[in-house]
């Protein structure tokens, strides 16, 4: 194997390549554009495009594509070759600055929530020079944003970039008050990606996995995760070979894949990269998911990224480790070592506390999907109720500040903000609260509700925006204060007082939390996607996103509609798939098996009336009763699907999908799973949970 530093970024048109290949002036101009986030001059773009093309051709590329992230949650690309007719039947390879900067994919088939119908029929993609171009399967991929002709965002990247600007602007204002001259502040994220690996043979035998990415049927295997022997366990050779190749592929793409290990459930694993800015991390996470699937296929396996591929077994999430960092690399959520730094840290901490409490709805929505609904609150993932974990130590410090009382760990009697050094509170690895949706982990927040298959763009767009809003209010107040220190203390204390209900350090899985305490505190509990989504377009949320120039009302409404439609579509595909599986395979298998048992009983009786056939008779009776119930539930689900298809209002339809279609699916599944335990394995039409979960040895 080539040495890792040589391998790393070898498929990326990164800074080192640019420096080497671009004329000095062009390199400088491009750099300036990137740093100041200006639009690129066409003459500069032409030179960059040409250098990019030459580099890509040298690496065997023949095509280029504008790579973008429409609201489907996955990435999109349309490949164009570099060829251009050169007379006498020949071609030359060309790529212009115009082609680099702007593309016009036929956008009419991407979800837009009615945006393009009302605005313009077409959309365009625009190069995002802050994310490097890269090579994938012989194609030069140019990361782009995707907008309608009237400028509305049709993708995930545009609002994310806008939210990064918003939080940067407000954080810079605050830092100025602390005497710091930051040029900009970046939001950073390290997404830990969980996934399942199963054998391809098994996968191909299950229509539910093929069509929906999750199992729609399946009784629990005798051995699940009870023994907890998989977490951090020895990695099997086949999985190890996959992980090794995955690392190499990710490194080539300039992705800092760092950590890999087995997860809690059998067949479940995790990959975590070193953090980067939210924009790059979002692009890289999309690439990582795609690469995982590709590499798995080369190893005869399938990588499942669904949030809940197996009922009753841990689901997969994507821990979104988020922080803010200045252009000079100062992490603003890292408690410092001087009194002043501590005060600054506490102010930023308070901004996050206030943001999370005030915008529980938006955080919940940012992770809402049909897939993630199975995971949130399923005794392995945080509940749908948003709260935050600060740890005992930090909570005690905040309490001391709020009440002006002693803090046990401190030598001074009353902590003076900006005067006293905070007591050192080491990151406690042994006592990490794994049940909290939003946990402070020493120098960053870990948002654990994000689903494994989702783009991290929306959660980070929301985080950046809501924190920008708190920071703005703090900056407004502090800028006009005569006594900075008093005003600072006032903000910290009043924020703690007003928002401490959001802090919960206990067990988020406990029923006393979900059913009693959280209710008492008045925290929002939005258990499903259709119940959560209407909050997105509440007036105060429209105002928030508009105030920070992240999303307009029109853009928000379009997103709301896309999310609703997506939910309904997913449920409908799953329900239809279930009906087909019941009709085409489960029902026939049960009928056939019961007939064979009945025949056995008859033959035995023919042989001698004295033979005991009570077991056969009882089995046939139970299977027949189950078949009748299955048929009844099948009819009910089919009717619900039909009803749903007739509905025209997107919200009503999504809610109905949840309340009637999804409920019907659960009932149908319960009977089928019961049947699985009655029917002989020889007759059961597809691999069981045990077969699939232990398929990679
Ligand atoms: P865990 O114990 O949860 O695995 P780690 O310390 O390994 O925690 O970090 C998990 C993720 O958090 C990694 O992707 C890491 O790069 C990321 N991370 C660390 N510091 C920051 C930061 N300042 N901003 C964003 N992400 C960070
Ligand atoms: Mg973690």
Image: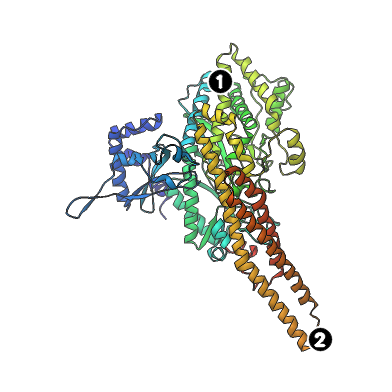
Q: Is residue 627 above or below residue 158?
A: below
- Residue 572 in percent (x, y) is at 58, 53
Q: Residue at x 64, y 60 (%)?
A: 217
The alpha-carbon separation of the residues under discs 1 and 2 comes to 91 Å
Query: Mark 1 against mark 2, which lies toward the viewer?
Result: 2
Which image quadrant is residue 304 in? bottom right
Q: Residue at x 62, y 16 (%)?
A: 487
Colouring scheme, one of rainbow, by chain, secondary structure, one colour: rainbow
Q: Nearer the viewer, residue 530 or 455?
A: 530
Q: Nearer the viewer, residue 639 or 608?
A: 639
Task: Tell me the quarter of the image containing the C terminus.
Answer: bottom right
Q: Residue at x 81, y 81 (%)?
A: 612
Q: Earlier in the sequence, mark 1 or mark 2?
A: 1
Q: Nearer the viewer, residue 119 or 495?
A: 119
- Residue 231 in percent (x, y) is at 64, 53
Task: Tell me the quarter of the image containing the N terminus.
Answer: bottom left
| Residue on which the image places disc 1 | 475
Residue 181 as seen in the image, left or right of residue 346: left
Task: Give the residue furthest to the right.
Answer: 610
Dot 1 falls on a residue whose secondary structure is helix
Q: Residue at x 65, y 68 (%)?
A: 587
Question: Does residue 232 appear anywhere in the picture?
Answer: no
């Amino acid at each position: 194997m080539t040495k890792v530093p040589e391998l790393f970024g070898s498929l990326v048109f990164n800074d080192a390549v640019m420096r080497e290949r671009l004329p000095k002036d062009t390199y400088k101009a491009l750099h300036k554009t990137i740093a100041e986030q200006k639009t690129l001059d066409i003459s500069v773009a032409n030179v960059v495009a040409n250098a990019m093309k030459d580099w890509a051709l040298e690496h065997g590329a023949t095509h280029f594509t504008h790579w973008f992230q429409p609201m489907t949650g996955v990435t999109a690309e349309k490949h164009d070759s570099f060829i251009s007719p050169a007379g006498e039947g020949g071609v030359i390879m060309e790529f212009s600055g115009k082609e680099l900067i702007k593309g016009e994919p036929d956008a009419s088939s991407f979800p837009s929530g009615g945006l393009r119908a009302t605005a313009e029929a077409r959309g365009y993609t625009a190069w995002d020079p802050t994310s490097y171009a890269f090579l994938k399967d012989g194609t030069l991929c140019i990361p782009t944003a995707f907008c309608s002709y009237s400028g509305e965002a049709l993708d995930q990247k545009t609002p994310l970039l806008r939210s990064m600007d918003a939080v940067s602007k407000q954080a810079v204002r605050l830092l100025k008050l602390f005497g710091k001259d930051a040029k900009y502040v970046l939001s950073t994220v390290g997404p830990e990606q969980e996934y399942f690996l199963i054998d391809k043979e098994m996968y191909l035998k299950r229509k539910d996995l093929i069509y929906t990415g999750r199992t729609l049927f399946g009784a629990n295997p005798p051995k699940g995760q009870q023994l907890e022997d998989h977490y951090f366990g020895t990695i099997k050779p086949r999985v190890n070979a996959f992980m090794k190749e995955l690392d190499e592929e990710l490194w080539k793409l300039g992705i800092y894949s760092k950590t890999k290990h087995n997860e809690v459930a059998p067949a479940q694993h995790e990959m975590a990269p070193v953090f980067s800015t939210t924009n790059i991390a979002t692009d890289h996470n999309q690439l990582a998911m795609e690469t995982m699937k590709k590499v798995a296929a080369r190893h005869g396996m399938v990588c499942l990224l669904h949030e809940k591929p197996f009922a009753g077994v841990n689901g997969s999430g994507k821990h979104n480790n988020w922080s803010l960092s200045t252009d000079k690399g100062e992490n603003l959520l890292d408690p410092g070592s001087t009194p002043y730094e501590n005060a600054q840290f506490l102010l930023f901490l308070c901004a996050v506390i206030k943001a999370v409490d005030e915008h529980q709805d938006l955080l919940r929505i940012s992770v809402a999907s049909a897939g993630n609904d199975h995971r949130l609150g399923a005794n392995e993932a945080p509940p749908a109720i948003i709260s935050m974990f600060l740890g005992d130590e930090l909570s005690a410090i905040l309490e001391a500040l709020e009440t002006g009382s002693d803090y046990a760990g401190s030598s001074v009697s009353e902590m003076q903000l900006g005067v006293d050094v905070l007591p050192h509170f080491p990151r406690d690895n042994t006592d990490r609260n794994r049940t909290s949706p939003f946990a402070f982990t020493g120098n960053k927040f870990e948002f654990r509700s994000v689903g494994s298959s989702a783009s991290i763009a929306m959660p980070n767009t929301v985080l950046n925006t809501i924190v920008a809003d708190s920071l703005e209010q703090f900056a407004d107040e502090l800028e006009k204060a005569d006594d900075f220190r008093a005003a600072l203390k006032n903000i910290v204390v009043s924020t703690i007082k007003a928002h401490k209900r959001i802090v919960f350090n206990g067990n988020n899985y406990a029923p006393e939390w979900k059913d009693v305490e959280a209710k008492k505190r008045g925290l929002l509990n939005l258990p499903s996607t259709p119940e959560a989504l209407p909050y997105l377009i509440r007036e105060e949320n429209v105002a928030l996103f508009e105030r920070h120039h992240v999303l307009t009302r029109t853009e928000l409404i379009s997103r709301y509609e896309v999310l609703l439609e997506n939910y309904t579509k997913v449920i409908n595909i799953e329900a239809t798939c279930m009906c087909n599986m019941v009709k085409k395979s489960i029902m026939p298998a049960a009928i056939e098996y019961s007939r064979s048992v009945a025949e056995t009983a008859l033959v035995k009786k023919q042989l001698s009336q004295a033979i005991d056939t009570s077991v056969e008779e009882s089995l046939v009776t139970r299977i027949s009763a189950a078949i009748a119930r299955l048929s009844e539930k099948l009819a009910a689900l089919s009717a619900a699907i039909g009803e749903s298809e007739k509905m025209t209002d997107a919200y009503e339809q999504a809610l109905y999908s949840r309340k009637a279609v999804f409920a019907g699916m659960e009932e149908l599944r319960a009977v089928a799973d019961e049947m699985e335990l009655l029917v002989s394995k020889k007759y059961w039409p597809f691999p069981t949970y045990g077969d699939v979960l232990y398929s990679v040895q």
